[in-house]
Image (spheres, rainbow, N blue to C red):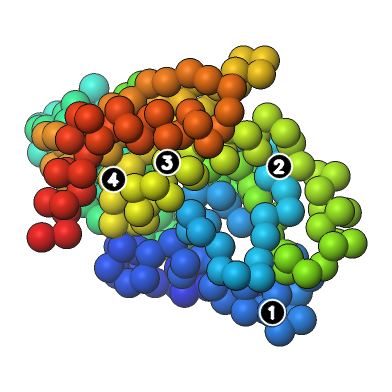
Amino acid sequence: MSTRGDEMLDRRLNEAGGKGLFVKELENALADGRADFAVHSMKDVPADLPPGFVLAAVMAREDPRDAFVSNRFGQLPEMPAKAVVGTSSLRRAAQIAQRYPQLEMRLLRGNVETRLAKLDRGEYDAVVLAVAGLVRLGLGARIRSRLDVGDSLPAPGQGALGIECLAGRAELMALLGTLNNDTAERCVRAERAVSRALGGSCAIPLGAYAEASGERLRLRALVASLDGRRIAHADCEGADPARLAAQAVEELRRQGADEILSALVK
């Protein structure tokens, strides 16, 4: 199936309905009985699912980092002033703008192949995409460098695939549950809890990334202004995903996250 999120090429997602553009039509197919389950990129799944739907599994995670793709440059620090970087992500744009204010950030929409074609036509000097998407499409060779998570904190759920089905289908949920990766699920749950607490959507430059070490998690999160001039950071450790997310949100708010978010909607 092709969703509106796949087909809309001229606007940012936050201007046309947000993350739900990628999942709503698939959920309609589940509700109508045209599909038994749907597989999503977890970074495209809204923080709260509609009543009657459930995530039956979160699968083992691919590399969650952002990828730098260019035909002229090997990495962001090599790019000269006024060079054009394409991205559809407010999160990526804000973090790049903070570190490289001399670069020009420009909207880039379309599926991965469309975005790469625009790069190859010379419309952009570089584009930033998810490593996981490129690798899964067999396009990993296009990656010139992978951005460190400290330089470009991933979106909640980035690199992970989730399987959604109707909550009433217990037998199917049990079957799909065998595909669940416990480590990935715990990490993604913590990340999505941060997004949920802060009203996470495509309209918010928000990053959250959790890493597991045994039973403990390290959760890093940020909220940024659109121009990257104000960024609130959190870096917390703990064992319980929900408590860890609450701790991270408290730290973000202590650093002014609410004021940053309020300015975004003015």
Q: CA distance from mark 1 to mark 3?
A: 28 Å
Name the residue located 58 percent from the left edge and 28 percent from the top edge. Answer: 240
Q: Regarding mark 4 in the picture, which secondary structure is present there? A: loop
Q: Earlier in the sequence, mark 1 or mark 3?
A: 1
Name the residue located 10 percent from the left edge and 38 percent from the top edge. Answer: 82
Give the answer, above or below, for where 120 lies relative to 142: below
Q: CA distance from mark 2 to mark 3?
A: 20 Å
Q: Are marks 2 and 4 in contact (CB under 8 Å)?
A: no
Crowding at label 2, few (<14), some or many (≥20) Cα neighbours within 10 Å? Answer: many
Q: In the shown orientation, is residue 74 left or right of residue 22?
A: left
- Looking at the rendered image, the quarter that the C terminus falls into is bottom left
Crowding at label 4, few (<14), some or many (≥20) Cα neighbours within 10 Å? Answer: many
Q: In the shown orientation, is residue 113 left or right of residue 1?
A: left
Q: Which residue is mark 2?
A: 59
Q: Which residue is mark 4?
A: 205
Q: CA distance from mark 4 to mark 1?
A: 32 Å
Residue 188 x/y as whole percent: 56, 39
Q: Which residue is mark 3?
A: 194
**Closer to us: mark 1 or mark 2?**
1
Q: Which residue is mark 1?
A: 31
For badge 3, the amino acid type reads: Val
**Closer to us: mark 4 or mark 3?**
3
Q: Regarding mark 3 in the picture, which secondary structure is present there? A: helix
For badge 1, the amino acid type reads: Ala
**Closer to us: mark 2 or mark 3?**
3
Q: CA distance from mark 2 to mark 4?
A: 25 Å
Name the residue located 59 percent from the left edge and 22 percent from the top edge. Answer: 239
